[in-house]
Image (cartoon, rainbow, N blue to C red):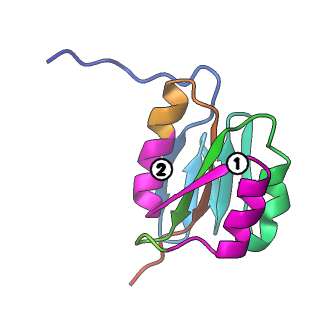
Amino acid sequence: MQMTEVTFADAIPIDSYGPGFFRIGGEVIEGGAIIHAKGARSWNGVEDVDAILALKSEIDFILMGTGATMAPVDSAFRQVLEEAGIGVEPMASPSACRTYNVLVSEGRRVAAVMLPVLEG
């Protein structure tokens, strides 16, 4: 099998995650995080929808990491995003981290909003 190194020419990768944090492009973000090609910052959950809407011209959809397990997306949150033309794909945060890295390595126009995986 031939191995190909993954590169992130135009994006910041999610390096890792742990109990209550994400390491993104070498920087640690405690709690929730929003990650896109040009940066990452803390994210305060579905009440922080304006942070996603500000990326509308740069993304086609978001991956939503819902914590340790997959959970439904808040319907009002989903409606606001879909009305703005931004799709949302929920999944457990570990899966969302991996999927985000694969998609940005392919040059896809995606952002991730992540709720942390908590201990215990």
Frontmost residue, 118 versus 71? 71
Q: Specify few, some or many for label 2: CA neighbours under 10 Å numbering under 14, 14-19, or 20 or more.
A: many
Instruction: Answer with the quarter of the image where residue 49 lies.
Output: bottom right
96 relative position to 76: left or right? left
Question: According to the image, label 2 marks what residue?
Answer: 97
Query: Real-space Cα distance between discs 1 and 2?
Result: 19 Å
Please provide percent x and percent y for residue 35.
Answer: 66, 47
Total numbered labels placed on residues in the image: 2
The quarter of the picture where the N terminus appears is top left
Which residue type carries mark 2?
A: Cys
Q: Residue at x 72, y 65 (%)?
A: 79
Which residue type carries mark 1?
A: Ile
38 relative position to 94: left or right? right
Frontmost residue, 56 versus 12? 56
Q: Residue at x 40, y 72 (%)?
A: 69
Q: Specify few, some or many for label 1: CA neighbours under 10 Å numbering under 14, 14-19, or 20 or more.
A: many
108 relative position to 40: left or right? left
Mark 2, secondary structure of its residue: helix
Instruction: Answer with the quarter of the image where residue 9 lies.
Output: top right
Please provide percent x and percent y for residue 106.
Answer: 50, 24
Question: According to the image, label 1 marks what residue?
Answer: 86
Span colored in magenta: 72-100
Against 39, residue 105 (above or below) is above
Please provide percent x and percent y for residue 36.
Answer: 68, 41
Q: Residue at x 32, y 17 (%)?
A: 4
Mark 1, secondary structure of its residue: loop
Instruction: Answer with the quarter of the image where residue 56 lies.
Output: top right
Badge nearest the viewer, 1 or 2: 1
Please provide percent x and percent y for residue 50.
Answer: 85, 59
The quarter of the picture where the C terminus appears is bottom left
